[in-house]
């Protein structure tokens, strides 16, 4: 059996070194790393994983993600890569989703009831993959330490109840281990309001510096390990300056005060609902194609999907369902030139083709009623219908020859539904994990007073130098079917509107 204790020379950048010294020299056990992408988060988490395993053979640890899907799709691949750089290799030093006893691995101190969400190391140490969207994921775990990736996406209450309370294990043989009981969370700066809990830990660290460390860094600190042209490429390819500044330079976004959706609240309107049994079943043998609608637990398979399209050189699509007294936003996607609507249809079909009933109610903006070419009666909406039908979908076109919806009426209707103070307005809920770009767009959509009331600020759509994923395109696609389905709830004389524009 190969031992984890062999040596390999590793060079740390200043931020990584600060994190290591915070634990080993300053003896801090609560470490929060707000680092831009490219700073070395994945590597430092792999480094601490190796050190935990090395210091405490046979111990149990938690590797935490906001969802099991996130762990499989993003955290686990990057962790494996970091471990390989450190000379720790899958199939030799550890196995994922199974007991390594048949390979001669030592048994853990606290063997798990099942192994499909376990990383088992050769010296008996194990990491349990704990997803916060599953309330039972961390139950029964006696943890000697915790690692968390993309922590700004975590639900702070679930993190405490499901994970932090398990970090209580103690063994006499591990008393001198510097990482005993350590909690290390890494994330780029949050882009949405939900991530405030993570940045709020900076103030906690200032008040309790002996135990807590909050370390901020941008990718610039890791410049020697990155290609010289990488920063320029990232700036060119990022959805917007906002995203580049946040994700790469670690600059926290400013708050939008005059929002078009002031009643949108993360704790009220966002939800997570994955089929974790399906995801755990593919842990040892998944590909990117495995992450299709089979992973979603929120689809009512007896109802048609609602597909809403916002037209233009940047094409946005939002997929939803109308439920009793509820409107549920399942997923969003987009395409831009040189891609076109055919690429968007292919993406939609690839994701949802496994549904037993392929029915879709189609909504789109008024541009969809424009003619594709002069001398023909075919509209962009007609073309979209044909593309979907060619994929085997039964399509009900709900927007053919429909007029433009007024901004002020949309603003009133949407915010009454979001506010939820009247039973006559169905509630709105948004799948947080499947709609990251839409949520950023909704939270950052500005409003202004126009000649006909409140209107959405569209200036970023006209800015050719700005990437469009986080402007108002996806929110526009979000608005279209909601207004069409529920506009009759607004009384002819219009209800008195007492909600302020500002949040």
Image: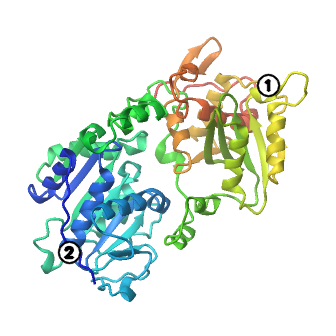
The scheme the figure's colours follow is: rainbow
Of mark 2 and mark 1, the one earlier in the sequence is: 2
Query: Can you say which quadrant of the picture contains the N terminus?
Result: bottom left
Closest to the observer, 221 or 498: 221
Q: Is residue 363 left or right of residue 299?
A: right
Position in image of residue 213 (x %, y %)? 18, 49
Q: Is residue 391 left or right of residue 320?
A: right
Disc 1 secondary structure class: loop
Dividing the picture into quadrants, the one containing residue 53 is bottom left
Mark 2–mark 1 distance (CA, rounded to whole Å): 67 Å
Assess disc 1: are there few (<14), some (14-19) or many (≥20) residues with their C-alpha within 10 Å of its C-alpha: few
Dividing the picture into quadrants, the one containing residue 477 is top right
Closest to the observer, 83 or 65: 83
Which residue bears the numbered disc 2?
56
Residue furthest to the front in view is 228
- Rendered view: 158 above or below 259: below
Instruction: Give yes or no for contact between labels 2 and 1 (Cβ–Cβ under 8 Å).
Output: no
Assess disc 2: are there few (<14), some (14-19) or many (≥20) residues with their C-alpha within 10 Å of its C-alpha: many
Mark linked to residue 403: 1
**Residue that appears at 69% across and 36% down:** 340
- Would residue 329 be visible to someone looking at this image? yes
């Amino acid at each position: 059996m190969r031992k984890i204790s062999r040596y390999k020379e590793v060079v740390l950048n200043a931020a990584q070194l600060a994190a290591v010294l915070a634990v080993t020299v300053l003896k801090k056990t609560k470490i929060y790393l707000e680092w831009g992408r490219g700073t070395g988060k994945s590597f430092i988490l792999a480094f601490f994983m190796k050190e935990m395993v090395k210091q405490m053979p046979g111990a149990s640890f938690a590797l935490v993600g906001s969802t099991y899907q996130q762990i499989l799709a993003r955290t686990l691949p990057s962790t494996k890569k970091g471990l390989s750089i450190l000379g720790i290799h899958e199939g030799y030093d550890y196995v994922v989703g199974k007991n390594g006893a048949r390979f001669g691995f030592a048994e853990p101190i606290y063997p798990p009831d099942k192994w499909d969400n376990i990383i088992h190391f050769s010296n008996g140490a194990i990491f349990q993959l704990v997803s916060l969207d599953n309330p039972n994921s961390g139950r029964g775990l006696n943890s000697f330490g915790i690692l968390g990736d993309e922590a700004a996406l975590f639900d702070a209450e679930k993190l405490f109840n499901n994970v932090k309370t398990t970090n209580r294990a103690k063994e006499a043989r591990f008393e001198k281990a510097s990482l005993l009981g350590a909690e290390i969370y890494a994330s780029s700066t949050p882009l949405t309001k939900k991530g405030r809990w993570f940045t709020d830990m900076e103030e906690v660290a200032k008040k309790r510096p002996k135990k807590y460390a909050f370390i901020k860094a941008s990718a610039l600190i890791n410049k020697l390990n990155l290609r010289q042209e990488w920063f320029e490429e990232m700036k060119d390819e990022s959805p917007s300056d906002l995203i580049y500044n946040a994700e790469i330079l670690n600059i926290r976004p400013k708050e939008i005060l005059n929002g078009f959706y002031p009643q949108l609240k993360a704790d009220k309107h966002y939800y997570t609902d994955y089929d974790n049994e399906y995801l755990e079943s593919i842990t040892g043998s998944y590909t990117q194609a495995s992450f299709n609608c089979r992973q979603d637990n929120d689809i009512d398979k007896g109802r048609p999907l609602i597909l809403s399209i916002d037209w233009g050189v940047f094409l946005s699509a939002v997929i939803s369902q109308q439920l009793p007294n509820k409107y549920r936003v399942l997923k969003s996607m987009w395409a831009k030139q040189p891609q076109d609507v055919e690429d968007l249809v292919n993406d939609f079909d690839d994701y949802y083709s496994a549904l037993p009933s392929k029915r879709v109610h189609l909504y789109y903006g008024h541009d969809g009623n424009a003619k594709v070419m002069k001398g023909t009666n075919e509209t962009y909406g007609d073309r979209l219908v044909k593309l979907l039908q060619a994929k085997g979908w039964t399509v009900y076109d709900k927007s053919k020859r429909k007029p433009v919806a007024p901004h002020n009426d949309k603003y009133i209707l949407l915010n009454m539904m979001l506010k939820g103070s009247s039973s006559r307005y169905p509630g709105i809920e948004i799948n947080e994990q499947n709609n990251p770009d839409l949520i950023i767009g909704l939270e950052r959509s500005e409003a202004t007073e126009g000649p006909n009331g409140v209107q959405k600020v569209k200036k970023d759509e006209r800015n050719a130098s700005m990437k469009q994923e986080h402007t108002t395109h996806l929110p526009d696609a979000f608005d279209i079917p909601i207004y069409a389905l529920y506009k009759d709830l607004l009384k002819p004389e219009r209800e008195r509107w007492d909600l302020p524009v500002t949040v």
